[in-house]
Amino acid sequence: MIGDSVSAAFGISQTRGWVALLGERLKRERLDYSVVNASISGETTAGGAARLKPALDKYKPAVVIIELGGNDGLRGMPVAAMKKNLSAMIEQSRKSGARVLLVGMRMPPNYGPQYTGEFERAFTELAKQYKTALVPFLFEDLGVWRDFFQTDGIHPTVAAQPVMLETIWKRLRPLLK
């Protein structure tokens, strides 16, 4: 698992974040996988791409979940650069023998329709290009419920974590052999 603050459980205990809940679920369902959370708050796709190869070499994962891009978008970085970095991570993961789950994000509408549309399509285009599993939008089942977001309006609360896990699980479960 490589991601940003959303997967690093920003503002809440890491033990209550969706990634920790995933580890618990794998144990409960007696699936022989362990979870390594290599998520860092503030991480961009460039940072993730730079950190991924050493993590792949160290942990030799069967599945890599890539939840990055949100910080690229919030900083207004070019979508083409984000796609290039995500492509490199998908390719590195595959080369190491791992299956990939790409997790998409969306930008707020104040970034303009052209940028938000291009940003959202990037994840779908990459999933099609690489024929990889995709969660189109990690927050798809959170809606606009205020209870699901911290006061910053960006980071999910403890209450949102099980919902996000279910969103991930639907696309992850078929990748688990």
Image: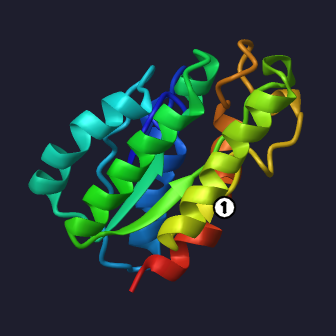
Residue 148 % position (x, y):
77, 33
The answer to which of 4 and 80 lies nearer the viewer is: 80
Q: Residue at position x 48%, y 68% from top?
A: 130
Q: Residue at position x 41%, y 51% from top?
A: 87
Occupied quadrant, residue 154: top right
Q: Can residue 56 be seen in this view?
A: yes
Residue 18 shown left or right of residue 33 in the figure: right
Residue 64 shown left or right of residue 136 in the figure: left
Q: In which quarter of the image is the C terminus?
A: bottom left
Instruction: Name above or below for residue 156 compared with residue 27.
Output: above
Q: Residue at position x 52%, y 56% from top?
A: 102
Residue 51 % position (x, y):
23, 37
Residue 83 % position (x, y):
50, 43
Disc 1 target residue: 166
How many numbered marks appear? 1
> Disc 1 on helix, strand or loop?
helix
The answer to which of 86 and 135 lies nearer the viewer is: 86
Occupied quadrant, residue 142: top right
Amino acid type at mark 1: Glu
Q: Residue at position x 43%, y 27% from top?
A: 44
Residue 174 % position (x, y):
53, 81
Q: Can residue 133 be seen in this view?
A: no
Residue 51 shown left or right of residue 164 in the figure: left
Instruction: Name above or below for residue 16 compared with residue 89.
Output: above
Instruction: Name above or below for residue 107 compared with residue 66.
Output: above
